[in-house]
């Protein structure tokens, strides 16, 4: 028997990780850039927020600092790629590797507990909001607000130039747009959202850990791909909604996988299977449609030949 509390927990996780999924959408879909910095910027946000909270800083301010440093991490990858001419994949790997040491330096150890510290969630509970509702309200409002702001940003002149950089870099450069700056800013904004998600996840689960970023880029990519498979991204608003919804669907898939008896160590292969299914879905549909058309064409030819034979006999 699945309790409503367990389903609510999966929904909360889907919404808090939706902020990260929006960041991944910005690089993989808008910029068409394979950014692996996510695996380092996610724990960076968690480490910075946890360290500041434990040092007595207001949790709202500590959370606000995380995306600033996440922007710096993403911009670093952009500089490595555009200025030093390092491939995008390798630039992300280099930044992610360097961030592991940075995160350890920030935290001072491998794990920082927050169970006895004041966080945004404990502040909301102090205002009289029940604990079962506080996290859901916070994460839902954050995901919706960031989605709407991202939609509005991508419709601005700068946002259109950013989208054009991912669609056709040569064309937009010929129109006088500095594509290097577009990439640096786009990667910075993406990892700022990822770091913000990491800061909120640390406060939600009650600790920040050096290894909490492992596989985050795959989880974010799975959310974006699943959302794109469910909701055809015919517009920016629908595409970002798909990223948010895909994050929720992905977390529910993980929840039911655990309920079916999969061990937590099996979640990586479950994630890989979900990505394969989501990616192969359109190809399978096209193949089935092609088979139906060929079958219909063959049936039509058979009928035509039968009519010709009858006409000759007649």
Image (cartoon, helix red, strand yellow):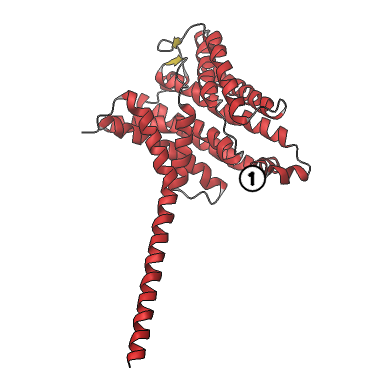
Q: In which quarter of the view is residue 9 placed? A: top left
Q: Is residue 64 above or below residue 150?
A: above
Question: Looking at the image, can residue 262 be seen?
Answer: yes
Q: Residue at x 40, y 12 (%)?
A: 115
Q: Residue furthest bottom?
A: 314
Could you tell me which secondary element the residue under label 1 belongs to? helix
**Nearer-the-camera pick, 18 or 228:** 228
Q: Is residue 77 above or below residue 237?
A: above
Q: Residue at x 38, y 85 (%)?
A: 308
Q: In which quarter of the view is residue 154 placed? A: top right
Q: Residue furthest left?
A: 1
Badge count: 1
Question: Looking at the image, can residue 249 be seen?
Answer: no
Residue on which disc 1 sits: 167
Q: Position of residue 198 (x, y in %)?
A: 49, 23
Q: Is residue 183 left or right of residue 200?
A: right
Q: Position of residue 20 (x, y in %)?
A: 50, 30
Q: Is residue 46 left or right of residue 27?
A: left
- Dot 1: within a 10 Å radius of its alpha carbon, few (fewer than 14), some, or many (20 or more) residues? some
Q: Position of residue 173 (x, y in %)?
A: 75, 42
**Nearer-the-camera pick, 242 or 6:** 242
Q: Residue furthest right?
A: 176
Q: Position of residue 213 (x, y in %)?
A: 47, 22
Q: Residue at x 41, y 65 (%)?
A: 293
- Give the position of the C terminus as an image quadrant: bottom left
- Give the position of the N terminus as an image quadrant: top left
Q: Is residue 199 above or below residue 178?
A: above
Q: Residue furthest top?
A: 108
**Nearer-the-camera pick, 218 or 154:** 218
């Amino acid at each position: 028997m699945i309790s409503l509390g367990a389903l609510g927990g999966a929904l909360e996780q889907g919404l808090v990780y939706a902020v990260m999924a929006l960041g991944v959408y910005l690089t993989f879909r808008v910029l068409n850039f394979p950014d692996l910095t996510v695996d380092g910027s996610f724990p960076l946000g968690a480490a910075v927020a946890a360290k500041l909270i434990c040092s007595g800083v207001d949790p709202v301010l500590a959370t606000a600092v995380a995306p600033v440093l996440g922007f710096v991490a993403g911009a670093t990858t952009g500089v490595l790629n555009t200025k030093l001419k390092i491939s995008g994949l390798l630039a992300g790997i280099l930044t992610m590797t360097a961030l592991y040491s940075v995160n350890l330096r920030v935290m001072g150890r491998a794990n920082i507990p927050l169970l006895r510290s004041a966080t945004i969630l404990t502040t909301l509970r102090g205002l009289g909001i029940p604990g079962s509702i506080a996290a859901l309200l916070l994460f839902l409002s954050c995901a919706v607000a960031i989605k709407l702001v991202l939609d509005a940003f991508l419709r601005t002149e700068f946002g259109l130039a950013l989208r054009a950089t991912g669609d056709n870099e040569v064309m937009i450069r010929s129109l006088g747009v500095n594509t290097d700056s577009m990439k640096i800013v786009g990667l910075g904004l993406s990892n700022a959202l990822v770091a913000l998600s990491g800061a909120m996840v640390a406060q939600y689960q009650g600790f920040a850990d050096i290894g909490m970023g492992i596989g985050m880029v795959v989880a974010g990519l799975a959310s974006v791909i699943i959302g794109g498979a469910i909701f055809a991204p015919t517009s920016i608003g629908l595409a970002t909604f798909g990223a948010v919804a895909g994050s929720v669907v992905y977390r529910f898939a993980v929840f039911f996988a655990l309920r079916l008896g999969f061990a937590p160590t099996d979640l990586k292969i479950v994630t890989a299977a979900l990505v394969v299914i989501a990616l192969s879905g359109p190809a399978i549909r096209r193949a089935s449609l092609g088979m139906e058309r060929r079958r219909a064409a063959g049936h039509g030819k058979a009928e035509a030949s039968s009519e010709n034979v009858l006409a000759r006999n007649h």
